[in-house]
Image: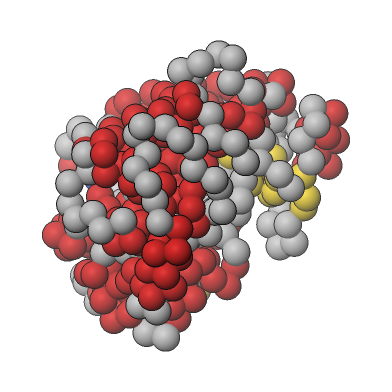
Amino acid sequence: MRLHRNLVFAVIDGLNEIFNEGAYADKVVQKLLKRDKRWGSRDRSFVAETVYDIVRWKRLYSEIADISEHYSRENLWKIFAVWATLRGITLPDWKQIAPTPTRRIKGRFDELSKIRKFRESIPDWMDELGEKELGSKWEKEIAALNEQAPVILRANLLKISRDKLRGILEDENIDTEFIKGYSSALQLTERANVFSTEAFKKGFFEVQDASSQLVAEFLDVKPGQRVVDTCAGAGGKTLHLAALMENKGQVIAMDIYSNKLKELKRRARRAGAHNIEPRTIESTKDIKKLHNKADRVLIDAPCSGLGVLSRNPDAKWKLQPEFLDKIKQTQSEILESYAKMVKPGGKLVYATCSILPSENQDQVKAFLTKEIGKDFTFVKDKKVLSSESGFDGFYMALLERK
Ligand SMILES: C[S@@+](CC[C@H](N)C(=O)[O-])C[C@H]1O[C@@H](n2cnc3c(N)ncnc32)[C@H](O)[C@@H]1O
């Protein structure tokens, strides 16, 4: 592979923003891809994949390059040289790239690969926490979370069947496969920019991981019901709920951030989902109004996101143990408060994209001992590990109000 100067410079600029300015990798990559209109799809994938790769393996590569905390441009070039060397790419003779001893890099790689926190490129605290919470499963799980996530689509059954969508995408040169056990999902056989397809513009599909597609189904919604999606965000699961309800009944989509709900509205228009009512949560009054009123409540709780590291590798470096303590407190408060919206006989799903029992089954157990929790019976739960499913790590529990 020959390295192109303007592409590698784009990568270095992107890493600088992510490592030094606290920018989110997905936003940075989105911006970088707009930098040069002449870039073809291979150039764009080089930029996106190299940035993500280096973010994912930041700790390992930094150790190999002997870099401590300071990510000066000079150090970013050193990390890039490690990335290229380990991939067998011949380094060009550019002044930014210092002479790089290939044998030393490979030797350091072999040596560091014997220690999990380096091999899997994660902070010490995360490795300790993963082992404490998941025991012997952690080793395989963190390895799976370091794999590049596949691109999965959810066919929007309000507009098209999964079979038809597959054919339409094929006509646009995008090949997909069905995934057994996931009724609306299509997996891309090769990465492609699906957002530029006509099918996307017409609202025929959403990009949504296969594990995430299990959540709305777990809530067992029926057309005509009143469903509250309490942490709706930009609406990934709201749109799925609307489709499962065949546009009949009402989905109240709530979140504390109105800008996310604005995006949800846009997506709902594209998807042809007409039964969604976004409502920003301004105060507890907005929740109280709905006490005992919902047939179904979804709590897709804010969480550590440890189940989706494949998609968001920069979370390894952004996440802090203090945040985890805070978010667990929020999860417990949300569960206790929002459960009151379920009417007698109604159902509640508590879900996270975390793999940690302390954010998942332990939260549900604790909830069931609270005053409101005693009104509920536990029906079932599903713990999705990335190492077992091949998709994002997720948790979902179904409870029923007596
Ligand atoms: C896991 S994300 C939701 C993802 C979304 N359901 C989807 O499928 O795309 C959690 C959401 O909870 C929201 N949130 C955080 N604290 C909240 C609270 N106290 N009440 C309601 N929503 C909250 C966040 O803004 C975020 O959008």
Q: Nearer the viewer, residue 192 or 91?
A: 91
Q: Nearer the viewer, residue 89 or 340?
A: 89
Residue 289 visible to an observer of this rendering = no
Quadrant that contains the C terminus: bottom left
Kindly indicate the quadrant of the structure image that contains residue 180: bottom right
Quadrant that contains the N terminus: top right
Q: Name the residue at the bottom extreme.
A: 136
Q: How many marks?
A: 0
Residue 91 visible to an observer of this rendering = yes
In the rendered image, residue 293, in percent from the top left (x then y), is placed at: 38, 46
Q: Residue at x 28, y 33 (%)?
A: 17
Q: Residue at x 48, y 53 (%)?
A: 85
In the rendered image, residue 43, in percent from the top left (x then y), is placed at: 58, 29
In the rendered image, residue 374, in percent from the top left (x then y), is placed at: 29, 73
Q: Name the residue at the top extreme.
A: 37
Q: Nearer the viewer, residue 290 or 234?
A: 234
Q: Residue at x 56, y 53 (%)?
A: 88
Q: Residue at x 41, y 28 (%)?
A: 9
Q: Nearer the viewer, residue 386 or 363?
A: 386
In the rendered image, residue 390, in percent from the top left (x then y), is placed at: 60, 64
| Colouring method of the image | secondary structure
299 is higher (above) or lower (below) than 393: above
Kindly indicate the quadrant of the structure image that contains residue 351: bottom left
